[in-house]
Amino acid sequence: MSHLLSKSKYIRGLQCDRALWLDVYNPRLAKYTREQMQRFDRGREFEYAFKDTFPHGIDISVELKRNVDAYPELTAMYLDKEEEVDLFEAGFLYDDVLVLADVVHKNADGTLDIYEVKSGNVLSETYRRDAALQHYVISHCRPINKFCVVYNGENRFDTIELAEELEEQHDEIARNIATMKEILSHGEPATPTGQHCLEPYACPYQHYCAQGVRQMSLFG
């Protein structure tokens, strides 16, 4: 089953409805700076280092590559087996939202321990919102034992357990998803540029939206 939203698109939608629409329908317009690409690379390196602490982990992405809509089915196949298992990039789909969990450990009783890996050295509000969406989706698919965010703190892999906090945000997340679906059911929003283009992240569609502003001022 195909998905409409992903974790990155949800976070984008919290920042700007126009950026969300572009991310879904015209992502080729995105332009990332060298600094942004370097940050992505650092994040992947930190994630890989943490995954190395699970030497028997099975990486769903190795088998399925970019066919992300097939991730939930293969994930379910592994989780339905009786034995414990560690999975990387495990896919879960609920409410038209697909999330890929960095590390999932299935316990003997069938519950899941989730580890979301972030390379930042502080637990930002965006990280918490990111984790909250994952908790919302995964908990509607499988029972969660614990949900941890791993970040680059004083001890390299500092870990904080957030399951109870994240569960309290489910109603808000459901409302946000409904709003985003409504936005995506119409044409491109005419959202003006502003401070939201820079916070919490520099939007990769700034150049496109700014070009529209210049055209309006010159020819409108």
Image (tube, grey):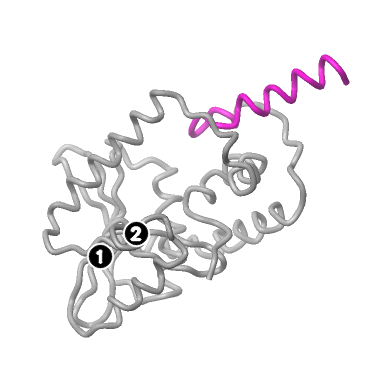
Q: Is residue 119 magenta?
A: no
CB contact under 8 Å: marks 2 and 1:
yes
* Most foreground residue, 34 or 126: 34
What secondary structure prevails in the magenta region? helix
- The part of the chain drawn in magenta is 196-220
Horizontally, residue 130 falls left or right of residue 48, namely right
Label 2: how many Cα within 10 Å (few below 14, some 14–19, many 20+): many
Does dot 1 land on a helix, a strand or a loop? strand
Three-letter amino acid code at disc 2? Ala
For mark 2, give the secondary structure: strand
Q: Position of residue 26 (x, y in %)?
A: 63, 42
Residue at left offset 16%, top offset 37%: 154
The percent coordinates of residue 38 (x first, y second) are 33, 28
Q: Residue at x 48, y 32 (%)?
A: 201
Which one is in front, 172 or 182? 182
Residue occupying the point 38% across, 40% down: 124
Instruction: Look at mark 2 in the image and give the residue it sits on.
Output: 101
Vertical placement of 108 versus 85: above or below?
Answer: below
Specify the amino acid type for callout 1.
Leu
Disc 1 marks which residue?
87
Please say if 42 is above or below 145: above
Q: Which mark is residue 24?
A: none
In the shown orientation, is residue 178 left or right of residue 107? right
Furthest-top residue in view?
218
Residue 208 covered by magenta stretch: yes
Q: Position of residue 210 (x, y in %)?
A: 68, 23
User: In 3D space, how far apart are the residues under numbered discs 2 and 1 (Cα atoms)?
Assistant: 9 Å
